Amino acid sequence: MNMQKSVCLFIWLFSFCLVFAQSTNFIKGKVFDAASKAPVNNCSVFINSTSKGTVTNNSGEFILQNLPGGKHELIISSIGYQTFVYEFNSTQLPLDLNVTLNQKSTELSEITIEPEVKDGWRVWGKTFLDNFIGTTENASHCTIKNTKALHFRFSEKRNRLTVFADEPLIIENKSLGYTIKYQLEDFYCDFHTHMILFLGFPLFTEMETEKKKQEMKWEEKRREVYLGSIIHFMKSLYNNQLAEQGFRIIRNFRIPNMEKKRVQDLYLGNIQTADTFQIGKNGTPLQVNQKRNFPKDSIIYYESVLRKPDFSVGYKAVIPDSLITANSDATKSLFFSDSLTILYTGPDKKRDQSWVFLITPQPIIVYSNGLYSPPQEFVTNGYWSLFEKMANAVPVDYQEK
């Protein structure tokens, strides 16, 4: 009997603790127009890059529950208003917020901007899709449902395409089984520097199906794109599990071509030297700088050396601890001055290779959930630059099954 009471008491205490924990793991609030102070209904309220989202009711109220741990961004957006971004940590929960949204200015900026491209989707739509959605197999199963929301500007002087949207983009990814509401904040494609950047805030909603086979196929595809992704890398780096998760880091450094430097000093320095003269004691001119005559074979060798690059690239395996520093707020800082090669060998023994560098460079902050900031500081090439598009995106609260 005493045993039964003890078991019942344990279950009751466990249930109480679970309910209490859930009851504090939320954000609630009200959203108002900054000018009129009136509540704003039907606002999109969500945690950036996750599957946690809702909308405000007629009174401008919202509540988000069962939030993932770690540091996140609360995003509140509505058509005609500037996007509201609020950073928080799960240790701060619960939160009760009063949010005011500022309306977007309709006045033209003092800075001259390029006019909108007429029939922009026809002219630039494919370029946008290739660089935003991607060109992988999954991209062929993605559709933007509201392409009319997109507007295009092109600067011939800067050779640069800029794209903006006047409402969140609705993306259906039938390969991964997600509907994504994407608040596009910035997109440009610089054809001069070959730099492509898009920034925004996605909310993921899982598609529903009654077919078990379809569910399994979606899960297989999600796991496939997650493994080897930047989020997978950042999570592994944060948790000191790079080797266990299949990642290797190699530092790329420049090695000066010393033979070319020697030839430049010897050969070019000689043939570029002008003959100069001075008058001797007896009044006769004396040649001071005499050019050397090189054998033909030597000239051929020297000129072949001069055609070679000034530097070659060296490679050295890197200990992750030398790149990352723990911060007092449970985040970590990632910094490196040279470019890095990131190698990933997946479960299928496929070998993916990416090159990364910091554009400023300045340290980036890495969070436990795999997010990092500022995202535009971390520039990629190779596998990640082709792969890390919206067609292959999963939420940061994705869990392998």
Image (cartoon, rainbow, N blue to C red):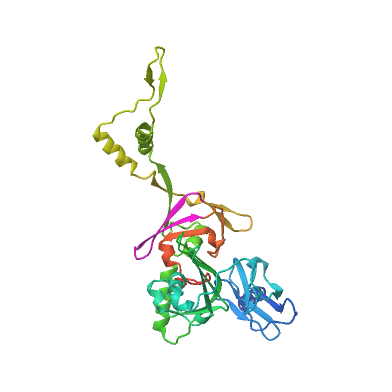
Asked whether, in this view, residue 105 is left or right of residue 294, the answer is right
Asked whether, in this view, residue 284 is left or right of residue 231, the answer is left
Residue at the (32%, 40%) spot, across then down? 305
**Which range of residues does the magenta coloring cover?**
336-358
Residue at the (69%, 72%) spot, across then down? 95
Asked whether, in this view, residue 248 is left or right of residue 162, the answer is left
Magenta span: helix, strand or loop, mainly?
strand
Which image quadrant: the N terminus?
bottom right
The percent position of residue 37, horizontal first and vertical second, equals: 75, 79
Q: Is residue 145 above or below residue 157?
A: below
Q: Residue furthest front?
A: 283
Q: Is residue 108 above or below residue 336?
A: below
Q: Is residue 311 above or below residue 273?
A: below
* Among the 4 quarters of the image, the one containing residue 312: top left
The percent position of residue 296, horizontal first and vertical second, equals: 24, 34
Q: Is residue 219 one of those drawn in magenta? A: no
Asked whether, in this view, residue 103 is left or right of residue 278, the answer is right
